[in-house]
Amino acid sequence: MTHMQDAELAALAQAGDREAFGELVARYAAPARRLARTILGDPDDADDAAQDGFLSALKHLGRFDPERPFGPWLMRIVANAAGDRRRRRRVREAQPLSPVLATHEAGPDVETDRQRFREVLRKALGGLPERQRMAVVLFDVEGYTHREIGEVLKVPEGTARSDVFHARRALREALGDWKEWREKS
Amino acid sequence: MEGKELMSHPSPFDHKPDTELGDVLRDLLTPEDEDPFVRGVVAASEHVYGEAPPVQTFSVLVEWARPGLVAAMLLLALGAFSLGIWVGRTGAVAEATLGDPLQSDMDQPSVPALMAGQEEPDWDVVLAAAWGR
């Protein structure tokens, strides 16, 4: 089934073919989970939301237009599921980053350096408005067009473009600060 | 390291995905345990399939087969048309070959005779002469 198009798999899944649905899940598990993590932060909540999204998509496969790409349609459902879950639950906040940076000691530990870089990036991403987070991840990670992102976010294409721009600028500023701080230490 | 690489692309106006920024974000957001997640979702889908019977397989296949059926019908029509021409030609040749056993070759219309005639020959005779040759 790996050679089949998304629309074919969707039709088969709608007809009750579990294997086809499984193939769709396998194809989109990573982007769906990443998008849910972008929205919710907490990995467990995000996985629950991604699963909710897949199951909701399965229920509504009849509404999917096979003439259009499956990915943005699914991502929109996943985003809705994550939003619903966020409203229902109190999302656990990430640990503040500043203490980690304050105790940083320059050294050759590459893995520690990498972990700190990830923390900086996580905090920078978490500091963005939700829509900008989603926009930059969908654009730079998933490779969707501004138009497709607009469909996922339910905003005009120009707004999606603006969201990507602002998110990129903020991320670069944060990472630039991190680089500057790292050189000083 | 990674931050330094990111700073080498200062413009946020790019209309193409920034692969470096994308890579670090992907590294940050991608979980490792994908197979258990997929299995969990597929297992949970049994509840969805159990809630409402899915649409009939036949109707979905018919939906998908519609373009194929149209193409097959067109091919069939084209094939029948071609076959008809071929059969028609074959029949004509056979008929011309067999001829009329009670008619001698001299009775067959000849082109020189038609050309030498004073009156305009009948169209059927011209065709018969052509087929006969």
Image (cartoon, coloured by chain):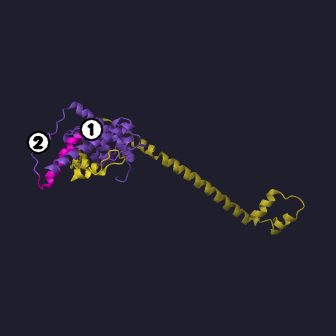
Quadrant of residue A93 within the rendered picture: top left
Which region is colored magenta?
A: A106-125
Q: Residue at x 36, y 38 (%)?
A: A150
Give residue B30's position: percent from left, percent from top. 23, 47
The magenta stretch spans residue A59: no
Please state which amino acid type lies under the numbered disc 1: Asp
Residue B121 quadrant? bottom right
Q: Colour of chain A?
A: purple
Q: Earlier in the sequence, mark 1 or mark 2?
A: 1
Please report the residue visible at 23 percent of the width from the left and 52 percent of the height from the top. Answer: B4
Residue type indicated by callout 2: Pro
Q: Colour of chain B?
A: yellow
State whether residue A80 is above or below residue A112: above
Front residue of this view, candidates A185 and A105? A185
| B91 horizontally vs A111: left or right | right
Q: Quadrant of residue A172?
A: top left
